[in-house]
Image: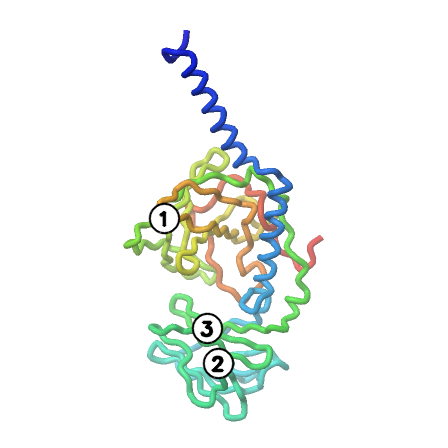
Amino acid sequence: MYIFSNQPFLHRYLLWMFTCLLFSFSLFAQPSDSLTKAIQQWDGQRIAELKAENGWLNLAGLEWLKPGMNSIGSGKDANIHFPAGKFPLSAGSLIWENNEVWYAPDAAVTMQDNGVPIKEKKLLWSEKGTNDTKLSYATIRWTIIKRDTKIGVRIRDLSSPAIQDFKGIDRFPARPDWVIQARFVPEPSWSFRTIPIVNVLGQTIQMKTLGKFLVNIGGQAYQLDAIEDGPGIPLIVFGDPTNDVTTYGSGRFLSPPMPAEGVTDVWLDFNKAYNPPCAFTSFATCPLPPPQNQLQLPVEAGEKLYKKQPK
């Protein structure tokens, strides 16, 4: 007895179902050698970004301003300390007042902003400005950053030993079962929805979210919030039981591509889970995973705990 009224229809239906299942399996079970090559290519780009001028390996300091005048230099009496031997003992002052940060140069020191010498008092940062200044002296680069109510100076050294000492990042072998299908639910274009994110400084900051990735991992359904990591760039900050064991203790990041408008079915590749900047330097301020992004199953995929000299 057939469920449908004619046998040929049943045969066509079963063939269609088999074809769909085979196609889905081919997407999910990507050949391991192909996946491994893809992850190796991704890893090479990741390492290049870490070593780049705006990467995380060259951070050499993070100093917080106090309201009013802040002297800068490598001398012990400076309020904002720069690397000794690579920066003048005294190089002027930073002035934080009226939601602005100004630089008052020392006449004996030639500081540059985006390659142009600074000869007079200059506005570096304002609450409503574009804030695209990049100060430099020899191999030192520094910028003004804001974290909640704190204003700081992020210092980089392009000749940092951390770049020369970098030996790569240990990782789990690439596995196709960690490429997981998900459904993306975007925030409406008019939405200004934010979620509270705690950072390593203990601050709770409201961060814009681009939407949720609905995914089933190990039989558990999750709604992973993706915060905005630059215009239209989603970032999933997640934690799992491997943290503080084989992976970084404060969680890891996943940066899936932003789905095209109207596209909801996506793939999350946890083989591309990576360490936050704080895994490489103490001079970064990283977000911690929100409760809804804490996974119950150990994610044995992606980057492991960073060590200067991996075994």
Q: Residue 242 vs residue 310: left or right?
A: left
Q: Using the image as rendered, state which of residue 145 and residue 70 is in the foreground.
A: 145
Callout 1 environment at 10 Å: few (<14), some (14 to 19), or many (20+)? few
Where disc 2 sits, the SS reads strand
Q: Nearer the viewer, residue 191 or 217?
A: 191
Of the image marks 3 and 2, the number of the one nearer the N terminus: 2
What residue is pinned by disc 3? 152
Instruction: Find residue 261 and name its label.
Output: 1
Q: Establish if 81 lies above or below 241.
A: below
Frontmost of labels 2 and 1 is: 1
In the displayed structure, does residue 40 sit left or right of residue 121? right
Mark 2–mark 1 contact, CB under 8 Å?
no
| Position of residue 50 measured from the top left corner of the image (x, y, whole percent) | 58, 62
* Pointer 2 residue: 113
Amino acid of disc 1: Glu
As helix, strand or loop, the secondary structure at mark 1 comes to loop
What residue type is disc 3 on?
Answer: Gly
Give the camera-side residue of 87 and 5. 5
